[in-house]
Image (spheres, rainbow, N blue to C red):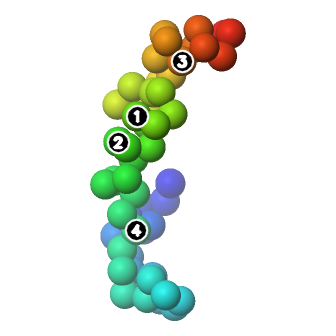
Amino acid sequence: MPPRLKTEPAKTGPAKGLVNGIDKMRPEYYKVRGWTADGVPTKETLARLGL
């Protein structure tokens, strides 16, 4: 992801003036997906998917 998405506020739209909050959302996203904090699928997730 380009660094500017984490630092530059949106110029238009409903989020105008707000900075992307991906760093705050990422841990919950990884948890819901069954991944580690580094974004790697856990052994349990791989087994559930048959991989």
Characterize the local packing of mark 2: few (<14), some (14-19) or many (20 or more) Cα atoms within 10 angstroms: some
Q: Residues within 10 Å of mark 4 (few under 14, many from 20)?
A: some
Q: Which amino acid is tagged 2?
A: Pro
Secondary structure of the residue carrying tag 3 is: helix
Taking the spot 37% from the left edge, 43% from the top edge, the residue there is 28
Using the numbered discs, state the Cα–Cα distance from disc 4 to disc 2 in whole angstroms.
Answer: 15 Å
Upstream in the sequence, badge 3 or badge 1? 1
Q: Which mark is residue 20?
A: 4
Camera-nearest label, 4 or 1: 1
- Tell me what residue is drawn at x 51 percent, y 34 percent: 33
* Marking on residue 45: 3
Q: Earlier in the sequence, mark 4 or mark 1?
A: 4
Disc 1 crowd rating (10 Å Cα; few below 14, some 14-19, many 20+) is: some
Contact between labelled residues 2 and 1, with CB atoms less than 8 Å apart? yes
Residue at 40% across / 34% down in the picture? Answer: 31
Give the residue number, with chain letter if any, for mark 2: 27
- Tag 3: amino acid: Thr
Q: Is residue 30 above or below residue 17?
A: above
Residue 43 in the image: x percent, y percent?
49, 10
Percent x, y of residue 38: 38, 30
Label 3: how many Cα within 10 Å (few below 14, some 14–19, many 20+): some
Question: Callout 1, which amino acid?
Answer: Lys
Q: Nearer the viewer, residue 21 or 47?
A: 47
Is 16 situated left or right of 13 in this image?
A: left
Point out the residue furthest to the left here.
24
CA separation, marks 1 and 2? 6 Å
Q: Quadrant of residue 48?
A: top right
Labelled disc at residue 31: 1
The image position of residue 47, as x and y in percent, is: 59, 8
Question: How far, Cα to Cα, is label 4 from label 3?
Answer: 28 Å
**Among numbered discs 2 and 3, the one appearing first in the sequence:** 2
Of label 4 and label 3, which has the lower sequence position?
4
